[in-house]
Image (cartoon, helix red, strand yellow):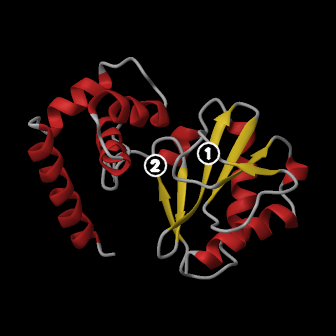
Amino acid sequence: MSSESLDKASATQIANIEKSTGKKLSEWIVIVNNSRLQKHGELVSFLKENYGFTHGNANMVVHYAKQSHAGAEENETDWIAEQYKAKENLKPWYDKIMTEVHKFGNDVEVVPKKAYVSLRRKKQFAIIQPSTKDRLDVGLNIKGVDPSGNVTAAGSWNAMCTHRIKVEDEKTINNDLINWIKQAYEQAG
């Protein structure tokens, strides 16, 4: 999807949100930011439960409120550097995973967000998120495959993912992890 069509799609979705709710996007941003909730998923649930939003509309409003939507401050912030502030020990793990991911093909799109990095092909297939000072989470989108081993169902951790792998030591960054990510990559093609 080109950035131009993404902009048109986003503009249409925002117009639809404003029409259906009677509030401007800027008003929803104030509501989200005044909620005192911090996590993306909590904010999405807040809008769905309290205001009847669909998941997609709630997700979009939260991304705009948290300035993590596509195009937000694109050239002003190095989101990856920001993610690893006070978590510098995790950056080599991220780099090691990305070295392997780039071997999948030249069609991997790396999209840094405020809290995580989205890996896309035709659609998002994985995210890499430094969740704590001691753990990276790898979220995957894999349909029709049961989690096994150190792979769990993503559950409420991230509604945009089906599977989750907690990387709590460098030994977890192995062929098994890379094969799971590659399976998600292949399904996204």
Q: Nearer the viewer, residue 123 or 147?
A: 147
Q: Nearer the viewer, residue 182 or 79?
A: 182
Q: Residue at x 34, y 19 (%)?
A: 35
Q: Which mark is residue 121?
A: none
Q: CA distance from mark 2 to mark 1?
A: 10 Å
Q: Is residue 4 above or below residue 98?
A: below
Q: Residue at x 28, y 69 (%)?
A: 3
Mark 2: few/some/many CA within 10 Å (<14, 14-19, 20+):
many
Q: Is residue 188 above or below residue 136?
A: below
Q: Position of residue 6 (x, y in %)?
A: 27, 66
Q: Residue at x 75, y 66 (%)?
A: 180
**In the displayed structure, does residue 80 sit left or right of residue 7?**
right
The residue at which mark 1 appears reads as 129
Q: Is residue 9 above or below residue 30?
A: below
Q: Quadrant of residue 158?
A: top right
| Quarter the C terminus occupies | bottom right
Q: Amino acid at mark 2?
A: Lys
**Element assignment for label 1:** strand
Q: Is residue 182 above or below residue 75?
A: below
**Element assignment for label 2:** loop
Mark 1: few/some/many CA within 10 Å (<14, 14-19, 20+):
many
Q: Earlier in the sequence, mark 2 or mark 1?
A: 2
| Quarter the N terminus occupies | bottom left
Q: Position of residue 93 (x, y in %)?
A: 75, 51
Q: Residue at x 52, y 39 (%)?
A: 82
- View extreme (right): residue: 171
Q: Amino acid at mark 1?
A: Gln
The residue at which mark 2 appears reads as 113
Contact check, label 2 and label 1, Cβ < 8 Å? no
Q: Position of residue 179 (x, y in %)?
A: 79, 70
